[in-house]
Amino acid sequence: MKAAFYKGNGAFEIAENAQVNPGEGEVMLDVAFCGVCGTDVHIYHDVKIGRVKEGENDVVFEVSGSAAAVEAMTRLVNVRGRIVMVAIHGGEQKKIDLFKFFWSEIEMLGVRLYESDGYEEAIRIAASGSAPFDTLITRISNLSNIQNVLEEIDQNPEGMKYLINHQQ
C-alpha cells in the first residue's frame, strides 16, 4: 500500500508501506480517505509540537484505548481536573491510579453513547442533501499531491477540510 513519508524541509516521499497482517482480535481497514489536520501542517513547517506537562492540564482526553495512555492520563491532569474518556477499552484491563483520582479529586467522564438513531438521522440528513456537506470539503486530492495540498493550506486560511484519497 502506498504511503506519504515526510522527510523534513517540506519534502515528501511516496513509497510502498509494508502491509501488516492483523493478529488475533485485530482487523485491517482499507482507508479510502484521510484528512490533513493542523498537526500535519505544523510538522510540515518543522514546528516543534509542544509537549503537555504532568499535572498542568485541566482537561485530558483519552482517545486511544491503549494501556500507556490510560496510565498517563492521571499523571497529566491537574488537581480537580477532568479526564474525558472517548476510546472504547476492550480486551485487557487497564490499570488506573485510583489513589491519584482520590487525592487529586479528578473527575472522569465517559463519552461513547452513540445511539443508532443518531447514526440513522445523520445518514438521512446527508442523503437528503439538506445539509451543505460539500462546502465543508475544500479539496480532495491524490496521495501523490500531498505536498501541494499542504502548500495550498498555507495560502487558503478559509479552507475547511482537505481530504487525501489513498486509493488513486
Image (spheres, grey):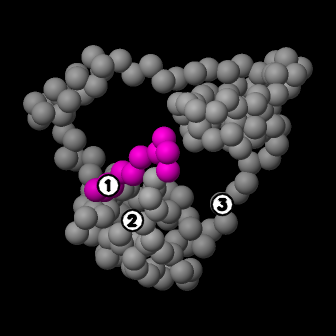
Mark 1, residues whose alpha carbon is within 10 Å: few (<14), some, or many (≥20)? few
Secondary structure category for the residue under label 1:
loop
Find the magenta span and give its range.
23-33
Residue for badge 3: 49
> Residue 153's mark?
2
Q: CA distance from mark 3 to mark 2?
A: 18 Å
Does label 1 or label 2 sit earlier along the sequence? 1
Q: Which amino acid, by three-letter code, is at mark 3? A: Ile
Does label 3 or label 2 sit earlier along the sequence? 3
Quadrant holding the C terminus: bottom left
Is residue 50 covered in magenta?
Answer: no
**The one of 150 and 31 positioned closer to us in this rendering:** 31
Kindly indicate whether the residue at mark 1 contacts the one at mark 3 (C-beta within 8 angstroms): no
Q: Which amino acid, by three-letter code, is at mark 2? A: Ile
Residue at the extreme left: 128
Mark 3, residues whose alpha carbon is within 10 Å: few (<14), some, or many (≥20)? few
Q: CA distance from mark 1 to mark 2?
A: 26 Å
